[in-house]
Image (cartoon, grey):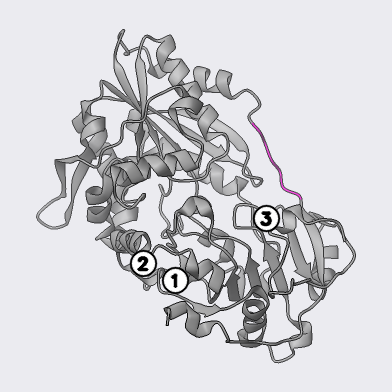
Amino acid sequence: MDLLDQVSELRSEASLPRMVRVRQHFDAPVVTDIDGTVARELAPFLTAITPGSRVGITAGSRGIANIGRILRAIGDAVRTHGGDPFIIPAMGSHGGATADGQTEVLHSYGISPETTGMPIVSSMEVREIAHLGDDHDRGPTVFMSETALAADGLIICGRVKPHTDFRGPVESGLAKIMTIGLGKHRGAQTVHAYGTRGLAHWMPRAAQAMVQVSGTVLAGLAILENAYDQTARLVGVAASEIGGAGEAALLEEAKGLMASLPFDDIDVLVVDEMGKNISGTGMDTNIIGRMLIRGVPEFVRPNIRSIVVRDLTDESHGNGAGIGLADIMTQHAARKLDLRATYINGLTSGIGGVQRVQLPIVMPTDVDAICAGVLTCGRGDPENVRVVRIANTLEIGTIEVSETLLDAVRANPRLEILSAPYPLVFDASGNLPVKSPAHAAAH
């Protein structure tokens, strides 16, 4: 018998509350002229390009708004200065830690020669370029992509935002794209072996070592997104500021732009989909309020007692990194897991990654999974259970909340009620027919 077939007859029954659709209103600056903004931000840094110079532009393994257009604009800016641009996949071990797999990941995000006007040059080959630390504090060996080292120039493109594993002056952004992304599988594994301390302490130092040793980093282009996952700012960053004060200031700005769930205490959070295109941990820990790494402090809010995951995005290619952040998942989601890709990602990410790929309880259908969440959330009065349903942790502008949260909704001026209360409707198989609250039909 298939392992997952063993739970096919497992059932869970509970009274589920009626739900209400709610819209959150966030402050949301937006870049309206991507091409012009990219050209202006990068212009001061591209004067060193000589005719025919091969300039590599990094592309990572995250779902970023307008990423194809942004990369194309960078390529156009390079050509304006006489360079010959190309794309370098910068994603550590993602894509199954293979060159073809990383190209496939980029294609799944709409990044291709056709959409960007540039070839993709993918290789997992790296070179050892530096050793960090000293006799008292030995640090990691720094590895860098041979493709990047062979380029005449490099532009580090990436989104700056809070990291899902640690807190520090520099978190997820340009330094990470360099250290983890351009370090490929070997470099990512080496830095992650130092745990969250390795990320917080060594990552920016490794990035600066790469800048200094390669001598070809022209600039970074930092992408900041607003609470609706739209492009809020595009900022040119000097190579010397990657991993430094310049990137740290952008991180603080990014924190102020982030969305969040509007409640401090939630009994059950239903997540329609998680995945690598949503967050490196499948679900953004900053949204769900769970770190789940031993020795790393947990979030103060939100306090979510049970998390139910319904699906894994197709763009994840089976990589279920972060599935351990959930308590319950559906059989449908579990069947989409590629355990090899998931475990490679987990092992590369160190002990935190290993802990977060441990499988939650698997239930056969949506209704069984949600009922199990209600029954195990620890609320002694299930008629007052507080349930929130989201599409994913990137799309929380429109959410579904249980009737029991309506008083809190009415008291929050940033929340707008969009519907009357309605029951969750499951099909004959016990699954929700509507994928996302953000696109649900009016009730």
Q: Quadrant of the C terminus?
A: bottom right
Provide the secondary structure element on which disc 2 rests: helix
| Foreground disc of the pair 3, 1 | 3
Q: CA distance from mark 3 to mark 2?
A: 26 Å
Q: Where residue 357 sits in the image (x, y, percent)?
A: 40, 69
- Residue 345, by quadrant, is bottom left
Is the residue marked by circle 2 packed among few (<14), some (14-19), or many (20+) residues within 10 Å? many
- Name the residue nearer the viewer: 151 or 156: 151
Query: Which segment is the magenta one?
Result: 25-30
**439 in relation to 266, above or below:** above
Q: In the picture, residue 151 is in which quadrant? A: top left
Q: Position of residue 351 (x, y in %)?
A: 31, 68
Q: Which residue is mark 2?
A: 352
Q: Give the Cα separation between the discs numbered 3 and 1.
A: 22 Å
Which residue corresponds to mark 3?
Answer: 396
Q: Earlier in the sequence, mark 1 or mark 2?
A: 1
Secondary structure character of the magenta stretch overall: loop
